[in-house]
Image (tube, coloured by chain):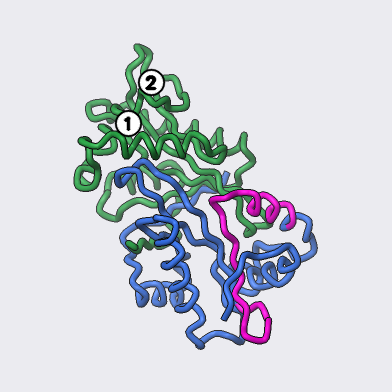
Chain colours: A blue, B green
Amino acid sequence: MIFRKAEKTDLPEIVQMLADDPLGAMREDLQHPEKYEHAFDVISKDANQELIVVESEDGEVIGTFHLTFIQYLTHQGSIRVQVESVRVREGMRGQKIGEKMFQWIFDRAKERGAHLVQLTSDKTRADAIRFYQKIGFVDSHEGFKRPI
Amino acid sequence: MIFRKAEKTDLPEIVQMLADDPLGAMREDLQHPEKYEHAFDVISKDANQELIVVESEDGEVIGTFHLTFIQYLTHQGSIRVQVESVRVREGMRGQKIGEKMFQWIFDRAKERGAHLVQLTSDKTRADAIRFYQKIGFVDSHEGFKRPI
């Protein structure tokens, strides 16, 4: 498996993975790639953001995730990594790809001096919640959202 | 009440508020201001971060919060506001200062084109959880943390 920064040409495959999911299907829009291209440009220019794709040995994109490194005052001025948009391609699940993705994320967090990795998972995603618990995450917090 | 970006001279009061709390007391370090000064410099240079202080009419700092504007691919390339380090000064609680702070945050989110405000709250903070529910947040997500 190869981990690399996403390029603009990866976008159709990334967006397909984001949409290929019961929650994602309701909120993504495959008919308007320009919205994702604009977002990609903003993400790419920000040194605190890393949109990553995972390639199989034969060069296929099989996973993606998005990291944001956030400097906080709390915990004595620490950096946290926030993980978002984690997806493994349909048909590739059950092969420990998620475990390898998070091992990469923990290593990357260490490299960039972060002390904590954080994410939220919709409470209806029972499999995801079990997965995160298994790899050492603690669900110590309520994850609140409010639309604007 | 006046809302303004924090200046470096506000740091002692901000850190005091962060530490003046059962959880904060365990993790902050008032003896090493240089750690917070370094973090402050990083935050100040980042256009996606806003560390805000709230002043009373007589110029006292009575509250603080930290916003991070994050561009995502999901939700058709949307921006979210993440809220962290929310504190109202001890002795000033019960005066609807928190409500006014979040009204300001929702307005600011709209100004910057965000579609969602998100935060996590430690499950032991029962009062905070009731407060967030009361002002329209939904605890739809598990908030996972993993130390590095």
Q: Chain of mark 2?
A: B
**The image quarter in which residue B30 lies:** top left
Q: Which mark is residue B55?
A: 2
Q: Nearer the viewer, residue B9 or B97?
A: B9
Question: Residue farthest to the top?
Answer: B58
* Chain letter belonging to callout 1: B
Q: Is residue B111 above or below residue A26?
A: above
The residue sitting at 42% across, 25% down in the picture is: B7
Image x and y of residue B17, in percent: 27, 33
Q: What percent of the width, then of the height, locates residue A12?
A: 74, 69
Whether residue A86 sits left or right of residue B14 in the image: it is right
A5 or B128: nearer the viewer: A5
Q: Residue at x 48, y 40 (%)?
A: B67
Q: Which mark is residue B14?
A: 1
- Amino acid type, mark 2: Glu
- Where's the C terminus of chain B, which quadrant? bottom left
The range drawn in magenta is: A37-62
Label 1 neighbourhood size at 10 Å, few (<14), some (14-19), many (20+)?
Answer: many
Given this view, does label 1 or label 2 mark the residue nearer the observer? Answer: 1
- B115 in relation to B60, above or below: below
Q: Residues within 10 Å of mark 2 (few under 14, many from 20)?
A: some
Q: Is residue B32 above or below residue B146?
A: above
